[in-house]
Image: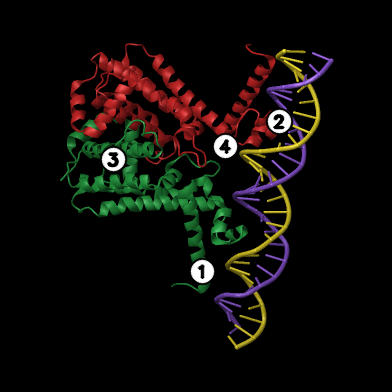
Chain colours: A green, B red, C yellow, D purple
DNA sequence: CGGCGCGCGAGAACACTGTTCACACAAGAG
DNA sequence: CTCTTGTGTGAACAGTGTTCTCGCGCGCCG
């Protein structure tokens, strides 16, 4: 129990606030997370909440980074559960977890990836780093796969032929900035894959897929297979 | 000028309400569309609005179907502007307009395709029909292309090999219901294409693409080319 | 161990929001 | 000309976020 008694009690209250806010988010969406509702849960005056939270927007930001973090943690856990040498398997598992977490936590997913919550702009410095984690993880796996020569050269040259110079330069800059040993066409392939995965997930969670694709599980599994193949990877 | 003076005035007021609500939506997002703000715009008492609108949710629904309609109209206009015999060109133009409208109207797009607005459930009977229009239009173009034998048989058989039975059955049922002369693998290809287009658009409008792809225009054009090729179509 | 600062909580107040109500007025229908 | 009906008003209620002022008393410091 590090810290003084006061600090520990403060931490407990902060946790309780976040727990309550999260519960209301899951049950009633963003509009349901209300300072007064949280205060009622904790049997506390509304104004007392301001000792722990700057504003309602601040509370939403907390929920937002929590959502991003849990999402990324889920992806990481799935990746880590796969044998380290099975890179296609790890990528598949990570992308599978990407959708699974989103389906299991639609409210958090909506907060994180839905339309920017009106009225409040999420502070970029707090969100971007964590929002980018799943993508970075997958990109890292793909990079080591490329390093080990597991990426088919044919798909890379094919992708290179349809890549315009401006985008390629942007990708090269990105690779340099993040120190990925990936050529621009490989990054393009990874971005393509991510767009498909995220697009499918968004459409499913937001209910725009229901009229079209009914047993979405099987469809997504097939999508994952195709995506991995498009990346130029062969399953073990 | 059909109808009595009263009916005309009523229509004018209704239009003014929608115009004001739409302006607030574009300027401040969903939270910005407020009955009191609209009333202030029209120099009217708040309670008077209830003569024209059942509730705030009802007003939001109106904006929602308006957004869907304009989006679909934009796609239709782009398709209609292409020579009737150039089906790949028409599909490309339609999908290009799909993104262009979304970028030009981020607030409406967010309302229509973002996280379900918390607290209120859009009445399905009013939204589904119009929400589905762009997809139906593209699917229709693809169907006539298939009818004319313009769809490469190779991609169809390839797609069929990775399609599970359940999904295929669902697609067949969809084709029968909508009376599309498309086999299940073709519908799968169309859905794949739509997921890529919508996914890219969502990520771009919601700002999740900015860290990755900088000159998004060129990238999207390339994506369109690849999507059309994946559909088994050859440009004129 | 004792004084006391200050972290913490309470409650009232203000400015907003959506929604409903009783009421008044005028315009069109018969 | 009457009188139903559409339209607009203002007050009221319940709920929201936020900001004050006010105290209490815990727990750190001497």
| Mark linked to residue A9 | 1
Same subunit, labels 4 and 1: the answer reads no
Work out how far the residue at label 4 is from the one at label 1, CA to CA, in angstroms: 39 Å
Q: Circle 2 sits in a helix, a strand or a loop, which is it? A: loop
Q: Disc 4 or disc 1, which is closer to the eye?
A: 1
| Residues tagged 3 and 1 counted as in contact (Cβ below 8 A) | no
| Mark linked to residue B44 | 2
Q: Chain of mark 3?
A: A
| Mark linked to residue B28 | 4
Same subunit, labels 1 and 2: the answer reads no
Q: Circle 1 sits in a helix, a strand or a loop, which is it? A: helix
Q: Where residue B134 appears, x then y in whole percent?
A: 40, 24
Work out how far the residue at label 3 is from the one at label 4, CA to CA, in angstroms: 37 Å
Q: Where residue A107 appears, x then y in whole percent?
A: 44, 46
Is residue D6 positioned above or below A177 on the image?
A: above
Residue A93 is at least partly visible in this image: yes
Q: Earlier in the sequence, mark 4 or mark 2?
A: 4
Given residues B160 and B195, the one toward you in this image is: B160
Q: Disc 1 or disc 2, which is closer to the eye?
A: 2
| Residues tagged 4 and 2 counted as in contact (Cβ below 8 A) | no
Same subunit, labels 4 and 2: the answer reads yes
Q: Chain of mark 1?
A: A
Which residue is located at x 35 percent, y 48 percent? Answer: A101
Is residue D8 positioned above or below A80 on the image?
A: above
Q: Chain of mark 4?
A: B
| Mark linked to residue A87 | none
The residue identified by callout 3 is A217
Which residue is located at x 58 percent, y 54 percent? Answer: A36
Q: Is residue D12 left or right of residue A199?
A: right
Other residues around mark 3 within 10 Å, as few (<14) / some (14–19) / many (≥20): some
Work out how far the residue at label 3 is from the one at label 1, CA to CA, in angstroms: 44 Å
Other residues around mark 4 within 10 Å, as few (<14) / some (14–19) / many (≥20): some
């Amino acid at each position: 129990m590090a810290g003084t008694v006061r600090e520990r009690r403060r931490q407990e209250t902060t946790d309780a606030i976040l727990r309550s806010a999260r519960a209301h988010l899951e049950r009633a969406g963003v509009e349901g997370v209300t300072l007064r509702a949280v205060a009622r849960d904790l049997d506390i005056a509304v104004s007392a909440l301001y000792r722990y939270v700057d504003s309602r927007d601040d509370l939403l930001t907390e929920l937002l980074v929590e959502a991003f973090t849990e999402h990324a943690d889920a992806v990481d856990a799935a990746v880590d559960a796969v044998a380290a040498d099975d890179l296609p398997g790890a990528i598949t598992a990570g992308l599978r977890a990407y959708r699974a977490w989103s389906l299991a936590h639609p409210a958090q997913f909506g907060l994180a990836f839905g339309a920017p919550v009106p009225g409040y702009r999420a502070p970029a410095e707090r969100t971007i780093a964590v929002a980018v984690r799943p993508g970075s993880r997958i990109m890292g796996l793909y990079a080591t796969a490329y390093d080990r020569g597991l990426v088919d050269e044919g798909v890379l040259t094919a992708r290179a032929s349809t890549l315009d110079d401006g985008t390629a330069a942007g990708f090269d800059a990105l690779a340099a900035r993040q120190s990925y040993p990936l050529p621009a066409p490989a990054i393009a392939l990874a971005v393509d894959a991510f767009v498909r995965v995220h697009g499918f997930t968004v459409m499913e969670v937001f209910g725009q897929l229901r009229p079209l694709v009914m047993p979405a599980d099987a469809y997504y599994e097939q999508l994952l297979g195709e995506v991995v193949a498009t990346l130029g990877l062969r399953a073990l």
